[in-house]
Each structure stands twice: as C-alpha cells, then as structure tokens.
Image (cartoon, rainbow, N blue to C red):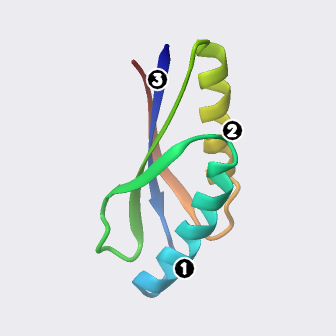
Amino acid sequence: MIVGVLTLDLFFPYARSLKDKRRILHGFKDRARRHNVALAEIDFQDLWQRSRLGIVTLNSQAAVVEEVLGRVLADAANLEETDVAGHEIRYV
C-alpha cells in the first residue's frame, strides 16, 4: 500500500477576511474530494490570506497515487482567487 501526502501552501491575495478565505477553501475542498482524497487545513487557520492544507490518498500502485495528487495540485493551480505558494509531496 502506497500513501501519498501533499502539503499545499496557499496564498489568497484578494481575501479581505477569514470569511473570504473559508469560502474559497470550501469550494476547493469540494472539488478535491472528487479525486478520492482526504484533506484538512493543518496550519494558518487564523490568517485570512494564508492556508496550509494536508491532502492524503492511498492505493496499491504508486502511479495512481502520483496521478491523483497531481490532479489535485493542478486544480489548486487553476484557482483564480488563490496562488500556490508552495507544495511538497511525500510517499509512505
């Protein structure tokens, strides 16, 4: 079994409040869950222009795990109201 962990740092340049940030995150989380992943905001919960997400998936084949995390990363990069400030992918 291969477990893939994607740590994603997001920047919200147009957010003016925590409500703005959470609205954007809620939509992204809904789209990401279509890829059969689990995710949670793991840092910067009280900052309105920053977020760190932990995204996890698992499969018996490493190629499938890599593909799923790649699609989630591509979805994050395509968000209009968000910039991907950094990411890290680890496999266990």
Q: Quick one: label 3 or label 2, which is nearer the N terminus? A: 3
Kind of residue sitting beneath label 2: Arg
Q: Quadrant of residue 78?
A: bottom right
Kind of residue at badge 3: Val
Sort mark 2 into few (<14), some (14-19) or many (20+) by Cα contacts within 10 Å.
few
In the drawing, what numbered circle is on residue 57? none
Residue bearing the label numbered 1: 14
Residue labelled with disc 3: 3
Closest to the observer: 24 or 34? 34
Q: Is mark 3 on a helix, strand or loop?
A: strand
The answer to whether marks 1 and 2 mark residues whose Cβ atoms lie closer than 8 Å is: no
- Report the mark closest to the observer, 3 or 2: 3
Q: Please tell me whether residue 36 is drawn above or below residue 24 in the rendered image.
A: above
Q: Is residue 43 left or right of residue 73?
A: left
Where is residue 42 shown, x and y percent of the image?
33, 54
Which residue is at a point 45% across and 45% down the rendered structure image? Answer: 86
Q: What element carries label 1?
A: loop
Q: Is mark 2 on a helix, strand or loop?
A: helix
Q: Which residue is found at the position 41% from the left and 73% from the top?
A: 49
N-terminal of the two: label 1 or label 3? 3
N-terminal-most mark, 1 or 2: 1
How far is mark 1 from mark 2, CA to CA? 24 Å
Give the number of the disc on residue 71. 2
Q: How many marks?
A: 3
CB under 8 Å between callouts 1 and 3? no
